[in-house]
Image (cartoon, rainbow, N blue to C red):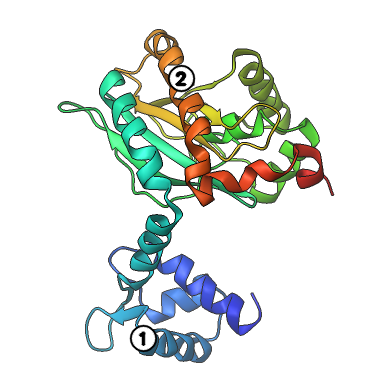
């Protein structure tokens, strides 16, 4: 990692995964930075209000300033106002977690959710995380809208999720991912069973108007003991209906509409 900006962003991204903070020495080691350089960058981030020390000479942690920036951006984008009522309704219909992910460049980031489970087992991850394209239902739903070569390029850039890091059924090869994408294209939605997280099943559909770039995905996820394959298949009409409604309403949100201006090939081909 080189360059002040790259190093600074590396610190922020690493600290975002450490809710309890991180010691200077550990942070410097993980980012392959000299301790002096890491300390200097952390001091700059502290002065700017993005990082704080949890105690004197102790661990460094993010402040809520970055969270505030993200929430402000989402509020200005209109995505929550447009999507939330539809997401809430799908969560109520299914009794499971429903999430909207937005495509931003080569990333797919979850930005809105509704929890339909009122009791018992619940899957409720943090928002703002980036989907692993090779083994998440949201990733498969997006990639299924692309030519195979473009989908493989995105997967190669991010890497293939392995069972030890994700779910026991995560595809181990690019060929296995391609087979999953072909099945997703054929049925119009992705269905995963313990590929992204152990004990978790999920399904997702792309959100986009016909012939145009998708702007994101809508997904349903829950514990595999409750959200069985049979139950997921029964939810397919509701999921696809929600995706179509989100696509139709997308013009009200600049974030959702950004993908509609161009065709697939010119965007994803090198």
Residue 241's tag is 2
Residue 181 or residue 270, whichever sits in front = 270
Which dot, 2 or 1, sits closer to the camera? 2
Query: Residue 18: x and y, percent?
Result: 35, 63
Residue 31 horizontal side relative to residue 84, left or right: right
Disc 2 element: helix
Query: Residue 2: x and y, percent?
Result: 66, 79
Query: Residue 11: x and y, percent?
Result: 48, 74
Q: Which residue is mark 1?
A: 46
Q: Quadrant of residue 57?
A: bottom left
Sequence-wise first label, 2 or 1:
1
Residue 266 horizontal side relative to residue 34, left or right: right
Q: Answer yes or no: is residue 66 visible.
A: yes
Above or below: residue 254 compared with residue 135: below
Above or below: residue 84 compared with residue 126: above
Residue 255 or residue 157, whichever sits in front = 255
Q: Residue sitting at 65 percent across and 33 percent down?
A: 143
Above or below: residue 184 compared with residue 12: above
Q: Residue sitting at 61 percent across and 20 percent down?
A: 184
Above or below: residue 255 compared with residue 205: below
Q: Answer yes or no: is residue 136 visible.
A: no
Separation of disc 2 and disc 1 at Cα?
46 Å
Q: Which residue appears farthest toward the left when viewing the image?
A: 119
Binning the other alpha carbons within 10 Å of mark 1 as few (below 14), some (14 to 19) or many (20 upward) gives some
Marks counted in the figure total 2
Query: Residue 132: x and y, percent?
Result: 54, 42
Disc 1 element: helix
Residue 166's tag is none
Q: Which residue appears farthest toward the right when viewing the image?
A: 270
Binning the other alpha carbons within 10 Å of mark 2 as few (below 14), some (14 to 19) or many (20 upward) gives some
């Amino acid at each position: 990692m080189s360059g002040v900006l790259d190093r600074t962003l590396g610190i922020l991204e690493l600290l975002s995964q450490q809710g309890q903070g991180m010691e200077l020495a550990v942070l410097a080691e993980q980012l392959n930075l000299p301790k002096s350089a890491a300390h200097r960058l952390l001091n700059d981030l502290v002065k700017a209000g993005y990082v704080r020390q949890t105690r004197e000479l102790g661990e460094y942690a993010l402040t809520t300033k970055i969270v505030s920036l993200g929430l402000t951006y989402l509020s200005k984008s209109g995505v929550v106002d447009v999507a939330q009522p539809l997401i809430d309704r799908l969560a109520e219909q299914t009794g499971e977690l429903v999430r909207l992910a937005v495509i931003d460049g080569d990333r797919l980031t979850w930005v809105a959710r509704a929890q339909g489970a009122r009791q018992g087992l619940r899957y409720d991850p943090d928002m703002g995380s980036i989907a692993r394209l090779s083994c998440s239902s949201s990733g498969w739903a997006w990639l299924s809208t692309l030519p195979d070569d473009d989908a493989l390029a995105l997967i190669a850039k991010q890497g293939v999720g392995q069972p030890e890091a994700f779910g026991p059924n995560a595809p181990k090869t690019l060929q296995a991912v391609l087979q999953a994408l072909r099945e997703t294209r054929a049925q119009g939605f992705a269905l995963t069973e313990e590929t992204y997280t152990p004990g978790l099943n999920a399904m997702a559909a792309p959100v986009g108007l016909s012939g145009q770039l998708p702007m994101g995905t809508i997904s349903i996820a829950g514990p595999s003991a409750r959200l069985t394959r049979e139950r997921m298949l029964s939810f397919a009409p509701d999921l696809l209906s929600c995706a179509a409604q989100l696509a139709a309403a997308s013009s009200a949100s600049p974030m959702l509409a950004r993908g509609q201006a161009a065709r697939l090939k010119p965007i994803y081909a090198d």
